[in-house]
Amino acid sequence: MLELFIDIKEELEMVESELGVAVQAENQLLLETYKYLLNAGGKRLRPALCFYGAKFCDFDLQRLLPLAVALELIHMATLVHDDVVDASILRRGKPTINAIWGDSVSTHLGSYLFAEALLLLTRNDYPQIVYDKLSRVGVKMCEGELQQISAAFDVTLNTRRYLQRINRKTAMLIAASAQLGAIASGSPPNIYLPLSRYGHGLGMAFQITDDILDLIADRKELGKPIGNDLRQGTITLPVILALCYDGPKMRLKKLVLKPQKDEAEMREAIDIIVGSGAIEQSYLLVDKYIGKAKRALEELPDIPAKISLQQTADFVARRKF
């Protein structure tokens, strides 16, 4: 995704450099696992949104850099924990931390990265609202993850509860990333509130697209096996919509509820979901949230960063990985 952010290439390179030295520890296992995680790369969406938000006010890279790095560390921590919860063995085409070092090491690495992000933030004098917002986001992210775990194999899950879950799990951190860069740069509410709404729409669209791609993406392009949510019993929007379809929904329900599915059953379930039109319906909701994000941008001044945020929304709407 770095190519998308060509206008902030130097800023993101500095984030990468700072991430490289963010973990300073004597424990070799910690250093080894963190280096492995860092080398796996990433979209760096959250630092990018932080920088773009700050462009609407007094942009000061040195002031923003710790915040941008902290946002990425928080995101990295959630990915490590997610892979443990989901028993994922691949991410971005490489074996996950838990696949190589086990769940215990992965859990502690994720917790360490959360703590390191907090430590980085406390070393800098940001407005109190920055700390308040991120603390609330952290709480809600955990709630979202627990909601997902408690709703495993729950075929009664509805769209409202699903949207509440992905808002907490994904959208709130993306919204905060767009908003907090502006707040840290001294912007007024008429700047940072539209940025928050933009980030929320973007985040919701991002997660719905993730859930779609888990069913229909090319495995090599996605960088991990498809159907992992279905295997784990995680009920996502396409499944919810397909279960409302008048076609073979009872067969789909039976397949979804089955704890252990072989490859033929996985293929059958995905074929039913695709055949129901649920993928197209899910993309309609993606478009709705992208539309909300773009409408929020209309309230902001016409500067180059605004165009970049529009392009980011377009990318999220059509991404394949």
Image (spheres, grey):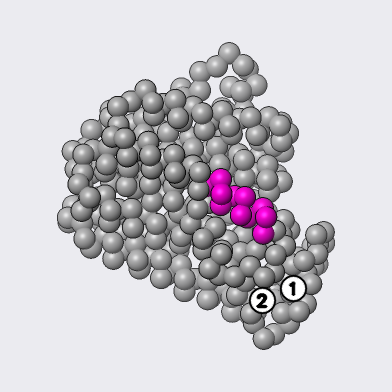
Q: Disc 1 vs disc 2: Cβ atoms closer than 8 Å?
A: yes
Q: Check disc 2 and give the amino acid type.
A: Leu
State the residue at coordinates (58%, 67%): 237
Q: In this view, does 318 lie above or below 107?
A: below
Q: Residue sitting at 28 percent across and 34 percent down? A: 127
Classify mark 1: residues with Cα within 10 Å, few (<14), some (14-19) or many (20+): some
Residue under label 1: 253
Q: Which residue lies most toward the bottom here?
A: 246
Magenta segment: does it hold 143? yes
On the image, the x and y values in percent for residue 247 come to: 69, 85
Q: Is residue 153 visible?
A: yes
Say the numbered circle drawn on residue 243: 2
Distance (Cα) linking label 1 and label 2: 7 Å
- Please identify the dominant SS of the magenta region: helix
Residue 93 sits in which quadrant? top right
Give the SS element for disc 2: loop
Q: Position of residue 49 (x, y in %)?
A: 35, 46
Give the magenta part as a residue range.
141-151
Vertical placement of residue 70 versus 176, above or below: above
